[in-house]
Image (cartoon, grey):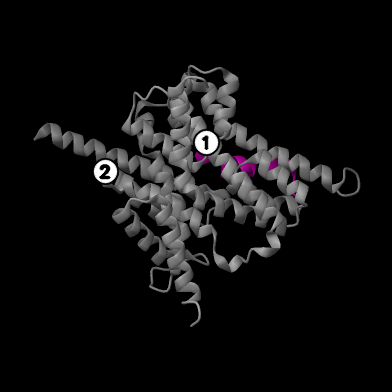
């Protein structure tokens, strides 16, 4: 690749490829609209897509450390996630959940400043 | 945008997105840093962020690009990593049917995890909300702006942001704040637990295919649980 087309050309074509993937996956269902017919059961299941997608992204981020499940108290991300959930339940504040959870994480990872 | 009701709806979309911006910002920052550290030039990293606008696909493409993988492989990988967006766009497609194709193309392009959930929340609460498309546009554009600004900061300040801060956790915590309120509905909670379990068990699958398996498994379980609950409700 390097000799004839140049690395730069390759990289830009690859960038356009990833861009095309964004359009294909996100826009085509909207463009097809009603022409995209799926079984009624699948249509009903889509109601649960938001919650299930969130859970599927969150769980590995919080539960896995170096590819291994870590359910112990020294998993700082898991503890922060649990405390963040509690913050949300009590205060109903999204930004408070994010910032509070991060502060817990930094406290668990770096300890108190000055100690 | 002269109609005040429509302007209200745009602002509402932005307002309901903004509390999530610390998470979006941290995520964009980390992605910007990763692009530069993998060896892309500043210009290429800017191009990838501004054009592709898909964090997980960008990160998945980086090792392929730096090893000069064939272009078709880059495209196919990015499509597979993005498959969850097909689920999102399919779920909301009926609300966009009346719009011209060009609007649907761009409104689809800006679907992200967070705005999809926000829009679904709105449709659940107020199915008849008349300005839902304007609401969606406001929130999704705000998400785009926050993401791009943070990504650009990450690209230019890559050397100043220590990896040990674990900033990507803030993105996960934003999603935690979105999923917790949905768990009050028992069938949804069942789906959430199954999706989480399957995602952990299948995380080793390439191209984030485990994520897709987890979403599908969770949706089916939630549907089954709701069906059972309704049947019992009718029977008693």
Q: Is residue A41 magenta?
A: no
Residue at 35% of width from left, 40% of height from top?
A: B220
Q: Residue furthest right?
A: A3
Chain under label 1?
Answer: B
Determine which residue is flagged by label 2: B185
Find residue B197 and report its image quarter. bottom left
Q: Is residue B79 magenta?
A: yes
Q: Residue furthest left?
A: B236
Along the line of sight, the residue nearer the viewer: A98 or A82: A98
Using a 10 Å C-alpha cutoff, classify the residue at mark 2 as few (fewer than 14 neighbours), some (14 to 19) or many (20 or more). few
Q: Main secondary structure of the magenta part?
A: helix
Q: Residue B25: percent from the left, percent from the top?
A: 56, 51
Residue B108 vs A56, above or below: the answer is above
Assign a secondary structure to mark 2. Answer: loop
Question: Looking at the image, how many numbered discs can be counted on the residues?
Answer: 2
Q: Is residue B228 visible?
A: yes
Q: Is residue B202 visible?
A: no
Assign a secondary structure to mark 1. Answer: helix
Using a 10 Å C-alpha cutoff, classify the residue at mark 1 as few (fewer than 14 neighbours), some (14 to 19) or many (20 or more). many
Residue B201 vs A108, above or below: the answer is above
Bounds of the magenta span?
B68-85
Disc with the residue nearer the chain's start (1 vs 2): 1
Q: Residue B80: percent from the left, percent from the top?
A: 58, 42
Residue B62 vs A40, above or below: the answer is below
Of badges 1 and 2, the one in the foreground is 1
Q: What is the number of the mark on residue B140?
A: 1
Q: Do dots 1 and 2 share one subunit?
A: yes
Along the line of sight, the residue nearer the viewer: B26 or A32: B26
- Name the image quarter holding the C terminus of chain B: top left
């Amino acid at each position: 690749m390097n000799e004839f087309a140049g690395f730069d050309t390759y990289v830009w074509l690859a960038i356009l490829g990833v861009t095309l993937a964004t359009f294909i996956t996100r826009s085509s269902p909207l463009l097809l609209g009603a022409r995209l017919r799926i079984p009624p059961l699948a249509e009903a299941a889509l109601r649960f897509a938001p919650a299930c997608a969130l859970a599927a992204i969150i769980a590995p981020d919080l539960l896995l450390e170096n590819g291994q499940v870590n359910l112990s108290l020294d998993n700082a991300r898991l503890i922060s996630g649990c405390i963040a959930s509690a913050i949300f339940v009590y205060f109903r504040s999204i930004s408070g959940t994010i910032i509070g959870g991060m502060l817990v994480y930094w406290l668990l990872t770096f300890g108190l400043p000055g100690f | 945008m002269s109609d005040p009701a429509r302007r209200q709806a745009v602002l509402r979309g932005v307002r309901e997105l903004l509390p999530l911006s610390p998470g979006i910002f941290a995520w964009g920052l980390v992605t910007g840093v990763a692009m530069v550290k993998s060896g892309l030039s500043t210009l290429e990293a800017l191009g990838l962020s501004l054009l592709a606008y898909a964090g997980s696909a960008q990160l998945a493409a980086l090792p392929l690009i730096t090893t000069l993988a064939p272009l078709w492989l880059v495209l196919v990988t990015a499509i597979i990593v993005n498959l969850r967006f097909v689920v999102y766009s399919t779920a909301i497609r009926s609300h966009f049917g009346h719009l011209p194709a060009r609007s649907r193309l761009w409104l689809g392009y800006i679907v992200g995890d967070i705005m999809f959930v926000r829009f679904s929340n709105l449709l659940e609460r107020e199915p008849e909300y008349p300005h839902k498309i304007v609401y969606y546009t406001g929130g999704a554009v705000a998400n785009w702006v926050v993401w791009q600004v943070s990504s650009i900061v990450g690209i230019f300040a890559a050397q100043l942001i220590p990896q040990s801060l674990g900033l990507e956790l803030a993105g996960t915590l934003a999603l935690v704040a979105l999923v917790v309120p949905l768990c009050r509905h028992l069938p949804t909670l069942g789906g959430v637990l199954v999706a989480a379990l399957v995602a952990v068990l299948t995380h080793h699958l390439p191209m984030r295919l485990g994520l897709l398996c987890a979403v599908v498994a969770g949706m089916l379980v939630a549907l089954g649980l709701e069906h059972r609950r309704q049947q019992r409700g009718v029977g008693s």
